[in-house]
Image (cartoon, rainbow, N blue to C red):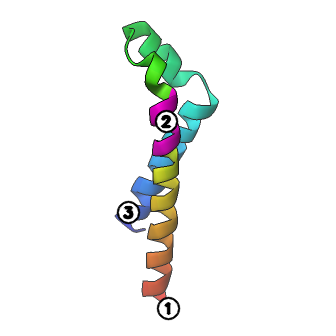
Amino acid sequence: MNKLIIVGISGTAFFALCCFTPLLVVLFGIVGLLTGYLDYVLLPALIFFIGLTIYAVSQHSKRSS
């Protein structure tokens, strides 16, 4: 599988997990950093990795054809 697809899927899964579970809130709550800014970071990162995955899959399918 293409490395770009693996990075895209891994990033999407990680940030989706962090958006839908309190995983990062707990981790950053322990440290006490950035908990107020998680909303400004998580959603754009999730959108970026979803876009990266779509781009990588489309490029992979073009090369396969």
Q: Main secondary structure of the magenta part?
A: helix
Other residues around mark 3 within 10 Å, as few (<14) / some (14–19) / many (≥20): some
Near-viewer residue (58 or 48): 48
Residue 57: x and y, percent?
A: 50, 71
Other residues around mark 2 within 10 Å, as few (<14) / some (14–19) / many (≥20): some
Near-viewer residue (12 or 3): 12
State the SS at label 1. Answer: loop
**Image quadrant occupied by the N terminus:** bottom left
Q: Callout 1, which amino acid?
A: Ser
C-alpha gap between disc 1 and disc 3: 18 Å
On screen, residue 33 above or below 56: above
Q: Is residue 30 magenta?
A: no
Residue 19: x and y, percent?
A: 58, 33
Instruction: Look at the image and give the residue range highlighted in magenta.
Output: 39-45
What numbered label is drawn on residue 42?
Answer: 2
Mark positioned earlier in the residue sequence (1 or 2): 2
Q: Residue at x 44, y 34 (%)?
A: 41
Do callouts 2 and 3 mark residues in contact (Cβ within 8 Å)? no
Residue 16: x and y, percent?
A: 57, 40
The residue at which mark 1 appears reads as 65
Q: Residue at x 46, y 48 (%)?
A: 10
C-alpha gap between disc 1 and disc 2: 35 Å
Q: Callout 3, which amino acid?
A: Leu
Q: Is residue 41 magenta?
A: yes
Mark positioned earlier in the residue sequence (2 or 3): 3
The residue at which mark 3 appears reads as 4
Residue 28: x and y, percent?
A: 43, 16
C-alpha gap between disc 2 and disc 3: 20 Å
State the SS at label 3. Answer: helix
Q: Residue at x 40, y 54 (%)?
A: 7
